Image (tube, coloured by chain):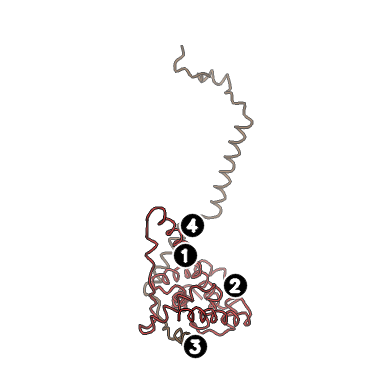
Amino acid sequence: MTFEELYQEYKDLVFNLTLQYVQQAEDAEEITQDVFVSVYQSLSNFKHQSKYSTWIYRITINKSLDFIRSRKRKKRIAFVTGIFFGDHNFSQIKTFDHPGVQLEQKEVLEKIFKHINALPDRQKTALILSKIEQLSQQEIAHIMNLSTKAVESLVQRAKNNLQQKLDSEG
Amino acid sequence: MKDHLAALETILRVEAPPFLFTRILQKVQRQSTEYVSPRIAWAFTLSMITLVILNIAVVSFGNGKPDDDFAKYMHLMPHNSLYHE
């Protein structure tokens, strides 16, 4: 499979998955670019031990989590800089802008995503893959390199954590 | 809780933005021109290490005095006066 064929087949999958992590079209586009640059660079080393889709899912998840970590780090640095030098750029936090969310669901989903974003990385990934991407537990287990039992437990813990946070908000 | 999770299932699939492929190819090209091959990186590192070792050797083992005959021949006087007085 050539790089262009891979791109045509998986571009929407990658873009939609990154959107579930960052809820920002602009950021999702940046991550999608990074994912395909990575795919381009390692395509010749791909050993066909897993399916292309599994491989691309893994790269997308890692790139999305890296992007979120780097964004958090930048925010922390900007916050500290703001304290010492009076620069308040850190307050320019991007708002929720998920193009797949319908207007009538926006308020509810913004609240849910706020809590999903606060979940530990593995719980977040298991929940996104299962509840939004609608993958089977077996597929998630393969992507995350875990047993199906472990995936089941991660999804359950993610649901419980979400439940607790949403209940406490009332 | 069931209602909240049901809301997650209403999220629509969207299409990747147009011209993304062109931007990816540009990024790939930019990265390949910025790329330094490992051979060049190793050659540079080895040269720097050699230079540092030579400097340390000169500072540690050299006697610090210029060769007298050579200094006389080249009129390199071992004092700081400007003119031969």
The residue at which mark 4 appears reads as B35
Query: Which colour represents chain A?
Result: red
- In the rendered view, tell whether residue B72 sits above or below residue A151: above
Label 1–label 3 contact, CB within 8 A: no
Rounded to the nearest whole Å, what is the CA distance between mark 1 and mark 3?
A: 31 Å
* Residue named by callout 3: B2
Q: Name the residue rendered at 48%, 79% in the picture.
A: A168
Q: Counting residues from the N terminus, which is met first, the one under dot 1 or under dot 2? A: 2
Q: Amino acid at mark 4?
A: Tyr
Q: Is residue A33 above or below residue B82?
A: below
Q: CA distance from mark 4 to mark 3?
A: 50 Å
Query: Which of the two discs, 1 and 4, sits closer to the camera?
Result: 1
Label located before the other in sequence (4 or 3): 3
Q: CA distance from mark 1 to mark 2?
A: 34 Å
Q: Does B7 sit above or below residue A81?
A: below
User: Circle 2 — which element?
Assistant: loop
Residue B21: percent from the left, percent from the top? 41, 71
| Chain B drawing hue | brown
Q: Is residue B79 left or right of residue A152?
A: left
